[in-house]
Image: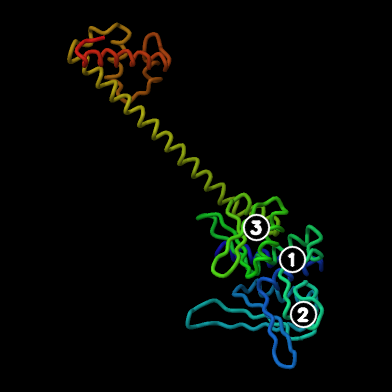
């Protein structure tokens, strides 16, 4: 099961308790996933389609809880393409359909109401904070998705209306988030791309199991990234140590081949022998081997003096 389906299944199981929140959730589903069908003799039906059984049950439950009306559910399967079941939820009663559309603010009462659809989010639907959360939840169930957080962080809502996308983005951002809108494939997409903000939005919608799962993945990814950074840093430091050691050995061997190491001052001679004997040791480790011990900066200073002597010899003895 994809992470998106896991999240939607959890959201679909949230108990329907307050009618105001149920209506807010349904209002989002109508705007994103609803289809109004007008047939002969002014018959109007409201339809919802989904491939997710949990969302189909949720839509059915919302309609039955709020309106206690006849709701038809049909299941279709495309065997040729081997796709999932396609669930069709239908409100066949014209009067109930009109009432639903009026209640959620999708149409206004009047003769041409069905031809003047309102994609704006009505302010009376989202007066309470709990209703705002319910509306966002409904929008995610109807047209949302979230990528596998192990790969990347991306959560989005897809809607056909620019006006609705702007309203939805504003609603999401009222919770201190920073959603943005992009036009893609004839649709408007409201999206979040930061892991922390997606976690916050999951909490807003009530997807706490998905939130914990995402947080576990985030922590694991952070640990992996920290380990990689540490390894890369240690590798880089090791490379520097090896390069410095090779350069120091080269200088020492050049001095030995030209004037002999015995010509070096006692403190430099002691360090030169130690470096030849302990080629992989760090400056700090070499310092502890000296008698008396010398700090890292002191060892580094002595190697600079050895390098200066070697360079002078390479330049023909000029100081």
- Image quadrant in which you'd find residue 114: bottom right
Q: Are marks 3 and 2 in contact (CB under 8 Å)?
A: no
Q: Which mark is residue 113?
A: 2
Q: Out of 34 and 8, give the one closest to the viewer.
A: 34
Q: CA distance from mark 2 to mark 1?
A: 17 Å
Q: CA distance from mark 3 to mark 1?
A: 28 Å
Residue ID at (76%, 82%):
112
Report x, y in % for residue 108: 79, 76
Give the label, 2 or 1, closer to the camera: 2
**What residue sits right under mark 1 in the picture?**
121
* Element marked by disc 3: helix
Report x, y in % for residue 41: 74, 93
Report x, y in % for residue 193: 58, 54
- The mark nearer the N terminus, 3 or 1, is 1
**What residue sits right under mark 3 in the picture?**
209
Q: CA distance from mark 3 to mark 2?
A: 41 Å
């Amino acid at each position: 099961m994809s992470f998106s389906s896991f999240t939607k299944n959890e959201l679909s199981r949230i108990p329907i308790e307050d009618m105001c929140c149920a209506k807010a959730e349904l209002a989002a589903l109508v705007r994103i996933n609803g289809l109004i069908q007008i047939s002969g003799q002014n018959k109007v039906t409201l339809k919802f389609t989904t491939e997710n059984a949990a969302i189909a049950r949720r839509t059915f439950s919302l309609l039955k809880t709020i309106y206690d009306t006849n709701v038809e559910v049909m299941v279709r399967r495309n065997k040729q393409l081997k796709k999932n079941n396609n669930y069709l939820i239908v409100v066949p009663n014209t009067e109930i359909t009109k009432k639903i559309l009026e209640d959620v603010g999708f149409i206004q009462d009047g003769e041409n109401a069905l031809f003047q659809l309102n994609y704006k989010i009505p302010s009376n639907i989202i007066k309470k904070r709990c209703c705002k959360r319910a509306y966002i939840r409904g929008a995610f169930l109807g047209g949302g998705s979230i990528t596998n957080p192990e790969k990347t962080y991306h959560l989005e809502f897809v809607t056909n209306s620019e006006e609705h996308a702007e309203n939805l983005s504003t609603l999401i951002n009222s919770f201190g988030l920073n959603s943005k809108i992009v036009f893609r494939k004839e649709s408007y997409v409201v999206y979040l791309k930061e892991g922390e903000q997606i976690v916050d939005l999951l909490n807003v919608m009530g997807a706490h199991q998905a939130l914990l799962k995402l947080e576990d993945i985030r922590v694991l990814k952070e640990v992996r990234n920290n380990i990689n950074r540490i390894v890369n840093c240690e590798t880089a430091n090791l490379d520097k140590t090896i390069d410095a050691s090779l350069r120091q050995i080269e200088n020492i061997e050049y001095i030995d081949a030209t004037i002999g190491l015995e010509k070096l001052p006692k403190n430099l001679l002691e360090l030169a022998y130690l470096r030849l004997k302990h080629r992989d040791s760090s400056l700090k480790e070499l310092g502890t081997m000296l008698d008396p011990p010398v700090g890292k900066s002191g060892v580094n200073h002595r190697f600079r003096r050895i390098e200066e002597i070697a360079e002078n010899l390479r330049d023909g003895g000029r100081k």
